[in-house]
Image (tube, rainbow, N blue to C red):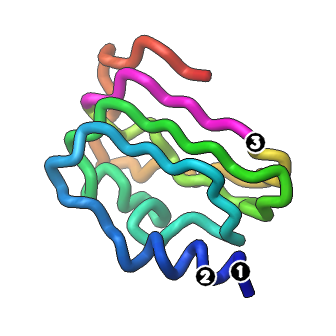
């Protein structure tokens, strides 16, 4: 299906660990890519400062990763999330997000 294809493409395009800005526009997958889930985001992309993800209205993502463990995150913008039912909990031993965040939308 088209939704599975969106996720498969993002799974295969795991960004470099030094990435500072992540923007995904018009995502329509059924779930987020594996490198964003299971508390992996702060390990796979520890230098992220800005995240902007827009989801299509028909997007069926029900589980969201925790963004709270990204130590350098300043801006977080998520739009079009109509189906979210669950946000992952942070692991106890993961570093906690500092005072860096200045905008959540």
Residue 38 among those drawn in magenta: no
Contact, mark 1 vs mark 3 (Cβ under 8 Å): no
Q: Disc 2 designates what residue? A: 5
Q: CA distance from mark 2 to mark 1?
A: 5 Å
Q: Position of residue 27 (x, y in %)?
A: 63, 58
Task: Give the residue number, with chain letter if any, for mark 3.
Answer: 80
Q: Is residue 93 left or right of residue 16?
A: right
- Image coordinates of residue 64 in percent, x first then y, are 62, 53
> What kind of element bears circle 1?
helix
- Looking at this view, is 48 or 23 the one in front? 23
Residue picked out by circle 1: 2
Residue at (21, 40) in percent of width and height: 47
Q: Residue 73's x, y, as percent? A: 34, 29
Q: Secondary structure at mark 3?
A: loop
Q: Which residues are magenta?
A: 72-80
Residue at 42%, 58% in the rendered image? 39
45 w.r.t. 70: above or below: below
* Circles 2, 1 touching at the beta carbon (< 8 Å): yes
Q: Quadrant of the C terminus?
A: top right
Residue 79 magenta-drawn? yes
Taking 76 as reference, is 58 left or right? right
């Amino acid at each position: 299906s088209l939704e599975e294809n969106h996720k498969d493409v993002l799974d295969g395009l795991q960004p470099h660990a030094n990435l500072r800005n992540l923007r995904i526009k018009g995502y329509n997958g059924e779930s987020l890519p594996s490198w964003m889930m299971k508390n992996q985001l702060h390990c796979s992309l520890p230098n992220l400062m800005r995240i902007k993800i827009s989801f299509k209205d028909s997007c069926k993502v029900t589980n969201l990763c925790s963004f709270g463990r990204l130590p350098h995150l300043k801006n977080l913008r998520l739009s079009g999330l109509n189906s979210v039912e669950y946000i992952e909990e942070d692991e106890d031993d993961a570093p906690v997000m500092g005072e860096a965040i200045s905008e959540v939308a």
